[in-house]
Amino acid sequence: MKTLLCPLNGIRNIDEFIYGGEYHVEPDRKQVDRKAWAEHVFFDTNSAGVVTEWWCHTPSSFWFLADRDTVTDEVINTYPFSIDPVER
Amino acid sequence: MRLSAPFGTRIKRDTRVFFSFNGTRLNGFEGDTVASALLAADVQLMSRSFKYHRPRLGLTFAGDDAATLVTIDHRANCFADTETLGQAMEVTSQNHLGSLEHDLGAAIGLLARFLPVGFYYKAFYRPKGIWELWAKFFRRSAGLGRINPSKQKVVPRTKRYLHVDHLVVGGGYHGMRAALDIANDGKSVLLVEQDPVLGGSLLYSRIDPEGVVAGRLAQELIGQIETNSNIEVMTTAHCNGWYADHYVPILQGHNLFKIRASGVTLATGSLEQPAVFRNNDLPGVMLGSGVQRLVHLYGVKAGHRAVIIAGNDEAYGLALDLLDADIEVAAIIELRAEPVKSGTRSALMESVVERGVRIITGAEPHAAVARRGHLSAIQLRGQASKEVHVAQYEPLETIECDLLCSSVGFLPQYQIPCQAGARLRFDEEDNCFTLDGLPRGFQLAGSITGKWGLDEPAPDPSHSWPIFPHPQGKEFVDQDEDLQIVDIVNAVADGFTHVQLVKRYSTVGMGPSQGRHSALATAKITAAANRTTIDETGVTTARPPLRAEPLAASAGEVFFPARLSSMHEAHSKLGAQFLHAGTWYRPACYPRPGEDRIACIEREVINVRRNVGMIDLSTLGGIDIRGPDASELLNRLYTGGFKGLAIGKSKYALMCNEAGVVIDDGVAARLAETHFYVTATTTGVENVYRQMLKWNVQWQLDVDITNVTSAYCVVNLAGPKSKEVLARLTTTDLDEDAFPYLGVREGEVAGIPARLLRVGFVGELGYEIHVPQTLGRHLWEALAAVGATFDIAPFGVEAQRLLRLEKGHIIIGQDTDAMTHLRELEMSWAVSRKKPFFIGDRTTAEIDTTRMTRRLAGFTVESANRMDVPQESQLVLEGDRMAGRVTSAAYSPTLDKIVGLAYVPATSAEGDTITIRVDHGHGLQATLCELPFYDPQTERQRVPDISVDVIEETLPERTSLISGSRSDLGNGVVIVDRTLSDRCGIRGRTAASWLESLSMLVPDKPNCAQVQKDGTLLARLSVGEFLFLGSSNYLGCHPDGADSNYSLPRADSHAWLVLSGAHSRELLQAVCSIDLRPRSFLDGDVAQTLMFGISVILIQSEGIFHLCADITSSQYLYDALGESINSMSI
């Protein structure tokens, strides 16, 4: 079983986490055209290489981001969403 | 026949072990394997081969061939050569028709010529239907062994976690050396050995002519290992695979250890490979190392007159061993030309020459000859060219022998490194396999690297072509599957040129030994047939498990999380039938004796409509939203508008995702300007809660979100007489004006602090009563007692489904799917257009500009026949075309007709007739109608004007959800249930400084705990969240609203167990996947993790462990801990 480094709880088995999808910067929902909006809602880049993903440590309900190489399945870095988070 | 000591290092000659083989009583010694005892008793035949039923006696004596598969005490397919002999074992042979000696199945061997490779694929296409005839035959001959279900013993099996710094697999010379080196660096090492003792091949192979070096080395190293406190040794333990980040399962007896290591060293060595020649499977033909094991470990003399086929120097060590064991060595067939020339001879070879053994060069094996089913001689021929066919040969002499040992080559145990991502390469120059591309932290030591020798690695001593085709075949490449050279060659000729295809077409390597003694020869023959190199050919993938393992090893001891409300026991007493909703157990219905399910559900429905019913809704999700931005958060997450919602009122709340798909619903109740309580569906709440947190991580609104589902026990009291029951238990004014429909009130019910919501889900006057979980049992009993005079009856989920269907209320997930949009549900009324946005608004707006294809509509069938009720997901037809499907349908006892919900064409209208395709293809005509089916004017919500005296009750005692707990579970673990003790949670952006201002000792970082001056314990779970064990008074200060800090109802949402005793840490280490070793998990450490599949908070303080977990899972957790203690016998 893989492990993942939770920024709050340390190294844990991957079954303590759920995957929250690729991280996207949301486009302006009022301005963006429908094609770009559909891209945002329905498509992931699914690229071969390093992608940024949402992960949640379920016992503590802690959401964070992970940079993962989809080719090697290596997690390069994990960190909380914001630089100055109001962590609860 | 037995040899005297010092041969037989593993047996204890003073203890006889009696057993039987095919009914014959035999005996061996303690320490024997079943196979060694059989050979010592001069048993000449152990099994029959899979395909041709050829007689077999064993090849490797290391558990690597199918020849030693036997049934032991009704356990089929045990490897006799690794199974330790036990008293009174009943051993029987497998795979023969009639007796082992006179196997009728052997006749199939005569047909071998007509059973070419790929026979299965070729033979059964024509004529059509021929397969039916063949199938009967094949079904009978497929598989090995017989399982007698009535004789199977269920053995308890355990799974345990184990953390080590470094794992070394293989306790031979190199494994022990690696373990010592790493341990001397101060790391903890687990050394795993498959045999009962350490030593590996040092215990049976010969390094020097005198035969003393190996034993001395073994003793020295074992001594060092035993005295090294950093090394833990696990023997008779098997490593069957490697998984990501050094997660390695180790099987030992009935235990499965899930090892997590920082590094892994594999020192599993290499496996000796057989020579391939005609009749190389006869009883009496064995691997040199197999014979050495028999001689040294078990003192078994496997024959009287031996011939050795030599492809390396190991053969000469073997020859010396045989001579010492008083076995005549008739000749050594030396396949190599150079080593025999004087000057290049090894010390071992010199010694063999000195002892007068005849060494034959320029010859190779032609065929082994049998007499009465056992090897009697070897025919030799002049050395031929390295080909897969033999065209001409020069016959040489025939040498009589009853033992033929081959020592021609080795294959590294490449399987597990390859699973870990390594590549297997063949170095043609050094004639050896090597492994590269290992993952980080993964090392190899010893001959698994492809290099040989103790300290100076030398090339692998393998002969390049120990393969000797015979004109009449029967040179077995794979002895498990009875495959000959010609089968591999023909597979390639049939076009299956790739080694992976050769395997699938011929089944080579698919037998019980998974190619461990056939992969090398297969690679060589395939390479030769393809006229390519071994490196290009490679070997087939070997997936875990490496060796056969019982399914029970992974299936055994599985825990299924269960959530029960505090009213569960009451439901059980009432005879409830339960159904699963996620991990919850919910009462489906409460049948009376002799009552069938449908009658029961209808009775419960009618009672709600006529009198009053009560249902346990504790599984309903509950989320507390507090803070200045609470209404803003709801406005963004739900479709409706919540800013204007009055305090003390609730509102339907519908949630979409970004794709505009409806994902959950509930009710949002406003308790204060900055405090909402939102309900969510039973199975949806976890996801809803997580999505809320995920959005707010990005939005950073000033709001606190808490999942309080388990903190409350909920009863929905519904029916025309519900007010009469409730009014007797509460002082809260229940009159229409004081407590209107959708109102929310805080008060007391039966002396319990309660939150009351006036709801109408089931279509009757009803009150949802939310009380603290630990007081739920009392609420249920109080309602049942007071309600008795009003014919109150509990109703289950089934009746509720029917009641809400009559009222036309949808259930998200049942009446919606992953494509359902707001418009299809005609729920635009639930959408606020007056707010900036909500999740899903943009997509919903886009969808609204397109043509709608379907909508959810109600239908009725005017038929009282309950048999006509359509099933969920039956199709709605428009002509021949699928136009929709039924989502809910039932016979309504209230309306005496069938009612249901279905997706129908968007163009259809009320009054239209639709056709539902029901069972057997019949069409059922149904009429579309307006919703709801029942009480369209909502007249049932009228509150009767009554006034009654309130029964005064005082606050009852809280009850734990763990029943029958006893503190000392034995085995050095004491568990105390402190669920009823004080505790609370505090969360907020300034919670830490607020607590400090109250003179508390605040842990300076998350996942730490601090004992307070008064003995209470404060654990910090995140930057702003604390769990306070031992007190609930917040030190005289209530945090709600103070500087954006909030209280969390931990005394009701979480159970609290305290574990102490000498073995409490050991227990937790075994059942918890995180590293809880004494030096990793210290006093004052906190871990939020999973245990038995549920979330727990584990705190170590002053030598004891505090375990907090969801209160509704507390019985499950308690039982699982108890079971683990028992099964581990710690």
Image (spheres, coloured by chain):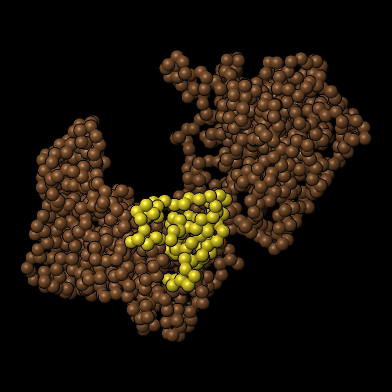
Chain colours: A yellow, B brown
Measured from the top left, where is residue B397 in percent x and y?
Answer: 82, 17
**Which of the image's four quarters has the C terminus of chain B?**
bottom right
Residue B506, relative to residue B664: is it above or below?
Answer: above
What residue sits 17% from the left and 60% below the top? B760
Q: Quadrant of residue A50?
A: bottom right
Q: Would you say residue B86 is visible in this rendering?
A: no
What residue sits 81% from the left and 47% below the top? B456
Return the residue nearer the eye: B352 or A34.
A34
Lateral position of residue B265 relative to residue A73, left or right: right
Total label count?
0
In the displayed image of the protein, which residue is found farthest to the right?
B343
Residue B382, relative to residue B1059: is it above or below?
Answer: above
Measured from the top left, where is residue B680 in percent x and y?
Answer: 29, 60
Q: Quadrant of residue B607?
A: bottom left
Lateral position of residue A18 relative to residue B792, left or right: right
Lateral position of residue B991 relative to residue B888, left or right: right
Return the residue nearer the eye: B261 or B880.
B880
Return the residue nearer the eye: B193 or B540.
B540
Residue B739, relative to residue B76: is it above or below?
Answer: below
Measured from the top left, where is residue B919 in percent x and y?
Answer: 23, 33
Measured from the top left, where is residue B349 in percent x and y?
Answer: 87, 34
What residue sits 30% from the left and 58% below the top? B841
Q: Would you say residue B509 is visible in this rendering?
A: yes
What residue sits 24% from the left and 47% below the top? B852
**Which of the image's four quarters has the N terminus of chain B?**
top right
